[in-house]
Amino acid sequence: MDIAALRAAHPDHWKLATAIRVLAIDAVQAANSGHPGMPMGMADVATVLYRNHLKFDAKAPNWADRDRFVLSAGHGSMLLYALLHLTGYEQATLEEVKNFRQWGARMAGHPEFGHLEGVETTTGPLGQGISTAVGMAIAEKSMAARFGKSVVDHKIWVIAGDGCLMEGISQEAIGLAGKQELDNLIVLWDNNNITIDGRVTVSDKTDQRARFAASGWVVLSCDGHDPADIDRALTEAKKAKAPVLVDCKTIIGFGAPNKADSYAVHGAPLGGDEIKATREVYGWPHGPFEIPADIKADWEAIGARGAAEHAAWAARLDALSPTKKAEFERQMSRGVPKKLATAIRAFKKANSEAAPKVATRKASEMVLAAVNPVVPETIGGSADLTGSNLTKTSDISDFMPDNRKGRYMRYGIREHAMAAAMNGMWLHGGVRPYGGTFFCFTDYARGAMRLSALMGVPTVYVMTHDSIGLGEDGPTHQPVEHLAICRATPNTWTFRPADVIETAEAWELALSSERTPSVLALSRQNLPTLRTAHNQKNLTAQGAYVIAEAAGKRQAILMATGSEVEIALKARDLLQAEAIGTRVVSMPCMELFAAQPEAYRRKILPPGAVRVAVEAAIRQPWDRWLLGERGSEKKADFVGMEGFGASAPAERLYAEFGITPEAIAAKVKALL
Amino acid sequence: MDIAALRAAHPDHWKLATAIRVLAIDAVQAANSGHPGMPMGMADVATVLYRNHLKFDAKAPNWADRDRFVLSAGHGSMLLYALLHLTGYEQATLEEVKNFRQWGARMAGHPEFGHLEGVETTTGPLGQGISTAVGMAIAEKSMAARFGKSVVDHKIWVIAGDGCLMEGISQEAIGLAGKQELDNLIVLWDNNNITIDGRVTVSDKTDQRARFAASGWVVLSCDGHDPADIDRALTEAKKAKAPVLVDCKTIIGFGAPNKADSYAVHGAPLGGDEIKATREVYGWPHGPFEIPADIKADWEAIGARGAAEHAAWAARLDALSPTKKAEFERQMSRGVPKKLATAIRAFKKANSEAAPKVATRKASEMVLAAVNPVVPETIGGSADLTGSNLTKTSDISDFMPDNRKGRYMRYGIREHAMAAAMNGMWLHGGVRPYGGTFFCFTDYARGAMRLSALMGVPTVYVMTHDSIGLGEDGPTHQPVEHLAICRATPNTWTFRPADVIETAEAWELALSSERTPSVLALSRQNLPTLRTAHNQKNLTAQGAYVIAEAAGKRQAILMATGSEVEIALKARDLLQAEAIGTRVVSMPCMELFAAQPEAYRRKILPPGAVRVAVEAAIRQPWDRWLLGERGSEKKADFVGMEGFGASAPAERLYAEFGITPEAIAAKVKALL
């Protein structure tokens, strides 16, 4: 579209959209880094969205029934920041715009959840936003079913670029959303035919419209610079009975006379000359960061547009029964129900007495059977391994288009989208998600699992088949480095419980976590109950504790996790039989142990004794506990894996890889 | 299709296909674990493929011009094993079939490259096979362009299940193959509508045919149990001018009277009763593992079918010029050209003199400019970050449908498929692949990177922007745990070169590697040349070495990698100014250092001095070198990251996170 004609035809719109563009241009220029092209290209679509469609109240960024807006193409962060500033979000000041990408900025290089109100999720790694949005849409449907359309009835809007659509995770998200008929999800595709390497056609000739349609989406399109056409498409999108893709044909860097429609405008400042020329094209005589008062006022009026609707909603919320309202608010604010601790205590008591010999994946299922009835906001699921992960309890049914009260997600063979969708559910509020796959396939979900940690989303990853103990499926399915990977990731609790009791304790911690995701690494193979004396206290909360004390003089300390605690205890028997006093420390969570006061750590790992750590995985995370914490190289050793596993029955693998009581005892004796 | 009718209509086919089925059933039963349903369902398709279409010679499993067969649905491994046994692959004995999934077995739970001839790639993690096959197809096109259709003219056949097609990586592979118009790639989709959780429709309603067509594939279909119909589809597929999806409608567990067409037959032995009943349905009176001699002979004739074609091909290869033939054989056998070492030495000499101050990503580009002309089998690429990764040298052009001699892949925003395709290129032979993205986005490629390590495929991962040094893009793009992740992965060399010289040395090692993949973690920011005295020897090969010796009595040892070596050297200046003798050790590759004899390690890290390690990443991998190797907790400290990074200019981040010469010097002094 010709810019002069556009300006003439839609003068009010033009001013609003141009304010976004120049803020993006100026902020990127001032920061001397950033991505101006996308905000310039999508300003028209975003203006129409915020002006006419998005349900929001700039003065109440956390209004529960607001529409969610997800900028999946997170590099275009200035589009979002400009919108938040212009519409009057309190934290999104002009000073912050000027501080874009600087130390301590709320307006980080890519939008980061928790830094700035109005940023619904962290984006930047491509494809995450659209997949997280699917989780938000699921949460909306779940909440609406549980609390009623009178208080939950909103849309999830996404802006996604070609990069998002080329990432594999997008297919997982598209397939999941299509199957679930999420008609509350609308993706606005910034179809500008440009990627960093040039035209999209350099690397792809996919007909995106046909691809989305193949998964049951409604596909619409519009001229992404014509406000009337955009408005028509968005109006239609809201009426669809399926998730919607709106193909918005746009020009990246719209209006930059020399750089528009090229990758040159994607990820670098325009430069002084081009900015000057662009301002002339825009008819924008104002200086850097200067927004005329009337245009700012018009934008703030848009920001206030939802206030009345917000007030009406508040009245409807008040009309709920006090119990229902309180429960709605508890779930939206992510509070932990008081009954959780009681249920876990009762579970521990019963099972320390019953002392079942079960795999910790089975123990996890038993815990969930006790937990799900008292934590009604859980939504469980699995990436097509329900019978293996044991994530579905009998009291919950499948979440489906015709059963939105269902609390079990059939994610399909889509580990990455599962993880991203779980992030989205929690970010939306009202849902506490957990989901399972084989521990080894955290490899497929890493991108989203890292975002759980970075955002502080307490997703629970139920990762079963956690070692060579899975046996015959072989090394492709046997994690050896994955405990190290999870432990290397900041703000992640990696639990590897040793028995049914530790499993219950890990679940209690995971479901009570406010801002830390949890990985539960669970065994395929059966393990005895080791904690047969009931203790109300959650010992796993300390990360490590003495599970068997040395008889006589303490000469050795064995440290182990999960299925290897049993083996360590047997090694202790061998050593004690030779009068070698041996303590066994169970260490279900290194991160929580590291967070204990030094005095506690020293009590568990006193200096003097030889130390042997036992874990069917690589040694890397153990050096701290073996050699550090007053340990010493001369008195420390490790029993575990040095390379990949193999295909054979589990018992044989443990024997062949030397993870046996005898091998442990021999190492201890060699050190004495 | 009615089984009785099928048997009557195609008696020869039926016997051949049934031999596959019963071997799969018997082997799974004997192993008491495995997946019988898929081989039972796809036996007809596989029989027609091997009998009439696949170009192979069972007596020459490594014939360069053979068709490649990739079992992407790797859990159906017994399908492949049965085919290899029946057609007469020497290693695929009946004893091996009986040893399925046992310790030391060639026939592992999932097909593993290197365990058994005829297994072209390791599969099991879903979606990997189809994506690896795309790389094989690219390699075939490249080799055909470079050596001629007379010696390179074959197909890549894939069997993929619903699981493969639901994984996100499959979309990346489909898009890449479609864009590249890989008409040598044929995917046979085992469309049985069953996943582990039940019907596919529980989690997906994607029209797969439309989805593939949207990316430019030819889509065919057949009744997957009717040999005539299968043959028609496969015949047509070979003529297509684009990659082909053949939708093979099948029944999982075909013929099992009580378990067919259900998930019950997917991943567990059939059990004695069902096996008996199934044998009756099949009309197969023979005992377990019993294949009548006539049927075995028919299969072996199929295995010998390609011998004449193989001989004709050998004659055509001999007809090439001796130089061309020798080069073909060198590339196919993955030999390293002798000129590589010479080029690297010349590069090091020139650059130790010129001493450029460049980012190591730029240094990498400079090395590649020297290397690509003398290693003609490299195919470079990037996941849409060419200008950032600096992976394209001026002498190579884009690999495209109209330019198959091109040596640069525009992978698009598809990190996972890039990694898998690179595996496929090397597995095919004739290509040494390298490819780039941001180091942080190894998260997206982990699934395939792990397979590089597990298979022993020496892919080179060019991972730029390797720390908070990337600056303003912020923590979503700043790796902190990724060095630990790569180092935790067995059989992976993680290089983090400190300057242009170490970068050249790392490249030499990576391109000379026979069975170990390499990750090159490269800086965004400029770094000075530290090694200004030319040394012919590749010091990086030792993993760590003294880059600056202590003046006077050695009181401290600083260890660092990459961009932090410069900082450590500045800290040394501060310390030496206070007469604290300080050695600086550059440790570009921990794995290679760990592999050195103890005497060498001790020479580099002698006991006594205090040790401080410096790396803009988490500490986990460093404990071994700080606390172990005769180090001690009381005399060791770490300067690096404890959590995620932030969005700000790089210098500011280094200052705020305390990775400075002053902070290092202070820690050393605190320990003295």
Image: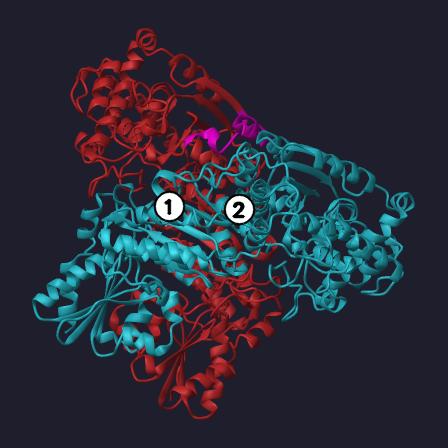
Chain colours: A cyan, B red
Would you identify the image quadrant in which residue B122 lies?
top left
Q: Residues within 10 Å of mark 2 (few under 14, many from 20)?
A: many
The magenta segment is B198-218
Give the side of residue A236 with respect to residue B29, left or right: right
Q: Which residue is mark 1?
A: A369
Callout 1–callout 2 Cβ contact below 8 Å: no
Q: Residue furthest bottom?
A: B579
- Residue B128's x, y, as percent? 42, 40
Q: Quadrant of the N terminus of chain B?
A: top left
Work out whether disc 1 and disc 2 sit on a shared chain: yes
Q: Which residue is mark 2?
A: A421
Closer to the camera in the image, B608 or A620: A620
Vertical order, B531 against B447 (above or below): below
Closer to the camera in the image, B314 or A29: A29
Residue sitting at x 41%, y 62%: A488
Residue type of the residue flagged with mark 2: Ala
Q: Nearer the viewer, mark 1 or mark 2?
A: 1
Q: Chain of mark 1?
A: A
Vertical order, A669 against B344 (above or below): below
Vertical order, A461 against A137 (above or below): below
Give the side of residue A255 with respect to residue B305, left or right: right
Closer to the camera in the image, A425 or B434: A425
Q: Chain of mark 2?
A: A
Could you tell me how far apart the alpha carbons at marks 1 and 2 are, in whole angstroms?
A: 23 Å
What label sits on residue B331 in the rendered view? none
- Residue A326's x, y, as percent? 57, 54
Q: Is residue B500 something one can see in this rendering? A: yes
Q: Earlier in the sequence, mark 1 or mark 2?
A: 1
B201 falls in the magenta region? yes
